Image (spheres, rainbow, N blue to C red):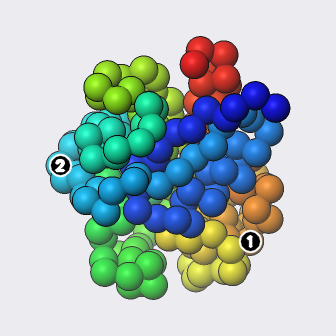
Amino acid sequence: MENKIKIVVGTSNPHKIKELNEIAKDYNVEFMLPSSENFDPVENGETFEQNAEIKAKEAARVSSTGEFFLADDSGLCVNFLNGAPGIHSARYETTPEKRIQKLLSNMEKAENREAHFVCALCLVDKSGKILHREEGKVYGKIALEPKGKGGFGYDPVFIVKNINKTMAELTEDEKNTLSHRGQALSNMLKWVQTKL
């Protein structure tokens, strides 16, 4: 096996690195956390794409190792809430449980429960130049109550279209294939494999 392409990910979440490496296991790519504790991007973009770019460039700026830097910005967009929580998904409330609670209470009167997850990925080099972008989406609706033990974030209340299970009820493999992050990442990996 040739040397793996190492890509630093703009995140401080080791769970995300584990998930990304799981999706990338058939590729010649390895993801890692930024080498610096100072990774603290100001996510003031107005779109998922802008926030992904901010995080990727910040990872490139603070890391002493690595030549490629990837970041994603993901969120849940609910039709009834005019696209909220959207880019504020992670900051909608202080804990995952409270975020789900707030979402469900805001949707008490909703007849239309349609929603989708978005994942925007941005890959930059050490100088911050954008090399490639990808986007993944998965459609579904918001459940009336949380179900399932897997996943994180809003997974327990997001029922995947045509499957009738929440994201948190899927197996790891099912989720990696179907999820917005899984889609965006597999397209990004294909690009990386042929272009880098």
Give the residue drawn at x 40%, y 62%: 12
Residue 30 found in image quarter:
top right
- Observer-side mark, 1 or 2, equals 2
Give the residue drawn at x 82%, y 32%: 1
The x, y position of residue 2, in whole percent, is: 76, 28
For mark 2, what is the residue?
A: 44
User: Which of 62 and 136 lies nearest the eye of the viewer?
Assistant: 62
Give the residue drawn at x 22%, y 43%: 46
Q: Calculate the distance from the C-alpha at mark 1 to the C-alpha at mark 2.
A: 33 Å
Few, some or many C-alpha atoms within 10 Å of disc 2 (few <14, some 14-19, many ≥20)? few
Few, some or many C-alpha atoms within 10 Å of disc 1 (few <14, some 14-19, many ≥20)? many
Q: Image height check: is 50 above or below 150?
A: above
Left or right placement of residue 189 versus residue 95 in this view:
right
Identify the disc placed on residue 169.
1
Q: Image height check: is 178 above or below 123?
A: below
| Disc 1, SS | helix
| Disc 2, SS | loop
Q: Amino acid at mark 1?
A: Glu
The x, y position of residue 132, in whole percent, is: 46, 23
Left or right placement of residue 135 versus residue 37 in this view:
right
Visible residue check, residue 182: no
